[in-house]
Amino acid sequence: MLHQTKWMVALWLASACTGVPDVVQLKDDAAVAGKILKEKPDQVVVDLGYTVLVVPRSQIVRISPGGSLVEGVPAPTEKPTAISLQPSSGAPVAKPVVGRSAETSEIFREGDGTGPDRSVRELVSLLGEAVVQVRTPSGLGSGFIINEAGYLITNFHVIESETQISVEVYHQNDGQLDRTNYKQIRIVAMNKFADLALLKIEDRNAPKFASVPLGDSDQLGVGERVFAVGSPLGLERTVTEGIVSTKTRPMQGELYLQTTTQINPGNSGGPLFNLHGQVVGVTNMKITFGEGLGFAIPVDSVKYFLNHRDAFAYDTDNPSNPFRYLEPPSRITKRLTQP
């Protein structure tokens, strides 16, 4: 879901204020914040603002209603949260400040955006190792690694309906690039509507991976130079350059970055960089009957997806998982009766 709107209101959360979200602390140091609608013996229903999430009790460590003290557990430290007012509905939706609140994750890092711009040639040399090729039996796309443990971002449509996924990484060794194909890929989370997927490389003896920092699409300016790295039509490590044409192009009910950077099939899921070497978007589509009309998902939507990845977890135990798996049919045994 995209949270770029016409205005943003910064609010300080305090336990004495009204509208303070309830915090549901989950296992694996994850958490969700929203309004608890109902508590049942086996599950808790939480309103996140844009959807209602049903959380199993087995996944809950503790619940802090309105930031209060529950079962002797201190309330979360007061931190600022950004509230974006959706023009379509006018309903406020809480959006955590990255790296600051209980809902945020350490799965990615952010660039500071300071310092002079660098040349595309220099940045490609520094960042190219973290751009990967995502292959499936029906096609291929691009992606980029966001931390050394092997977590990577690509488009949902790149892996949609696929169960066999491989990732090609180009490791730098003594100034040379060695192609390595990893086949043990786990789908961590996916959001069909935002066209985003989080994967993880889990091959045995996999090294620490080079990664890229995420930027801030709100700080991006129209006319600013950007470049993409990907595998258009299977031509791996292809670099294209352009500018940001607009930051708020509506397409199919969402807002996208529009860029003159050339985007073609195979670029899907790859990074769009600014000249600070930060990812500012995820390339995902183009207008086929025009030139220089490419589109990318703003990086703020990517960070929101990562911070709330538990809500989009690809897990059969997750009640919010969009996929349902039926039990295999049981074998019917016929009893023979004696006449």
Image (spheres, grey):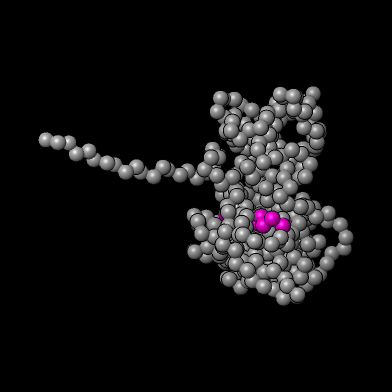
Q: Is residue 184 left or right of residue 19?
A: left
State the image quarter where residue 119 is shown.
Answer: bottom right
Height in image: 27 above or below 184? above
Counting from the top left corner in percent of width and height, residue 149 is at 69, 55
Furthest residue in direction right, as rendered: 115
Counting from the top left corner in percent of width and height, residue 159 is at 54, 57
Height in image: 76 above or below 314? above
Which region of the structure is painted magenta? 148-156
| Rendered residue at 60%/67% (across/down) | 181
State the image quarter where residue 328 is shown.
Answer: top left
| Rendered residue at 80%/70% (across/down) | 122
> Could one spot residue 120 in this view of the protein?
no
Height in image: 126 above or below 198? below
**296 or 98: nearer the viewer:** 98
Counting from the top left corner in percent of width and height, residue 96 is at 74, 40
Counting from the top left corner in percent of width and height, residue 286 is at 61, 62
Q: Is residue 283 shown in magenta? A: no
Furthest residue in direction left, as rendered: 339
Height in image: 315 above or below 173? above
